[in-house]
Image (cartoon, grey):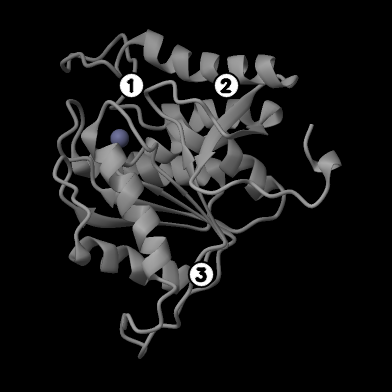
């Protein structure tokens, strides 16, 4: 059996979640929220590392962020598609953990898997709420469950956020969680091939973006998100 999560963060590849919303997750965990991560693929097409190394790094990063659970669906890296088969696999996970909030990939990005995973996860959140869609992971029919909110984090491209989260006290946790993926990012001692994400500039740019979103919104560091619906607040004073 499983437990209910407050937040489920979904990424096409292990490390997407850390890069896109690692600090927000660390902040929510510190606030007492139960958070889980679902990686859709093992990142087997990555220029560096192997699926086994990547899985160990993902486990280490999950520990740094303090999430309750991290699962991997084992879908094919590079060939994600928004199919019924893949939607239902994600529906099973959403119903298993019943998250109120789902965080998922950027709506548009350099890696084609990211936009595909974005739509795939978002569609699965909707479909998960339809009672007529039956799923069973070994304990009988799963209860239909639709998350209240689906937000998309920002990763490679500078997408204009609809709102930002003040993560000033958690940017170091994010950096440590990203660096847990030792095989993937800047390492002056590595003999493996270079790629756009192995430059020092890449890690720096992730932190600069948070600093710049913070500058624009009056905090030290912020992470941005987009939404498919308008954001509703109870009172104007909730916005600052
Ligand atoms: Zn990715």
Instruction: Locate residue 129 relative to residue 28 in the image: left or right.
Output: left
Please tell me which residue lies in front, 151 or 70. Answer: 151
Q: Quadrant of the C terminus?
A: top right
Q: State if disc 3 and disc 1 touch (CB < 8 Å).
A: no
The mark lying in front, picked from 1 and 3, is 3
Q: Quadrant of the N terminus?
A: bottom left
Q: Position of residue 181 (x, y in %)?
A: 36, 31
**Residue at screen point 44% across, 21% down:** 158
Q: CA distance from mark 3 to mark 2?
A: 29 Å
Ligand 1 closer than 8 Å to the CB at disc 1?
A: no
**Residue at screen point 30% across, 47% down:** 117
Q: Which residue is mark 1?
A: 185
Marked residue nearer the N-terminal end (1 or 3): 3
**Residue at screen point 70% across, 55% down:** 32
Q: Residues within 10 Å of mark 1 (few under 14, many from 20)?
A: many
Q: Secondary structure at mark 3?
A: loop
> Would you place residue 59 above or below residue 170 in this image?
below
Q: CA distance from mark 2 to mark 1?
A: 18 Å
Q: Secondary structure at mark 2?
A: helix
Marked residue nearer the N-terminal end (2 or 1): 1
Q: Position of residue 72 (x, y in %)?
A: 30, 55
Q: Which residue is mark 3?
A: 98
Q: Quadrant of ligand 1?
A: top left
**Residue at screen point 54% across, 49% down:** 229
Q: CA distance from mark 1 to mark 3?
A: 33 Å
Q: Residues within 10 Å of mark 3 (few under 14, many from 20)?
A: many
Q: Which residue is mark 2?
A: 210
Instruction: Give residue 130's quadrant in the image.
Output: bottom left
């Amino acid at each position: 059996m499983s437990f209910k999560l407050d937040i489920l963060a979904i990424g096409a590849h292990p490390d997407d979640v850390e890069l896109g919303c690692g600090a927000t997750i660390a902040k929510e965990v510190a606030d007492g929220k139960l958070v889980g991560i679902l990686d859709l693929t093992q990142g087997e097409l990555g220029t560096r590392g192997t699926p086994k190394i990547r899985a160990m790094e993902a486990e280490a990063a999950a520990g740094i962020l303090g999430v309750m659970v991290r699962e991997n669906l084992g879908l094919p890296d590079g060939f994600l598609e928004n199919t019924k088969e893949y939607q239902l696999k994600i529906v099973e996970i959403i119903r298993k953990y019943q998250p109120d909030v789902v965080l998922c990939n950027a709506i548009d990005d350099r890696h084609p898997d990211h936009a595909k995973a974005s739509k795939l996860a978002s569609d699965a959140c909707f479909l998960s709420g339809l009672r007529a869609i039956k799923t069973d992971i070994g304990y009988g029919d799963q209860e239909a469950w639709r998350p209240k909110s689906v937000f998309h984090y920002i990763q490679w491209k500078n997408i204009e956020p609809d709102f930002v989260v003040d993560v000033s006290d958690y940017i170091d946790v994010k950096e440590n969680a990203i660096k847990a993926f030792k095989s993937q990012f800047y390492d002056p001692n590595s003999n493996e091939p270079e790629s756009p994400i192995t430059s020092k500039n890449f890690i720096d740019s992730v932190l600069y973006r948070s600093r710049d979103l913070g500058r624009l919104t009056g905090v030290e560091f912020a992470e941005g998100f987009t939404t498919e619906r308008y954001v509703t607040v109870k009172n104007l004073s909730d916005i600052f």
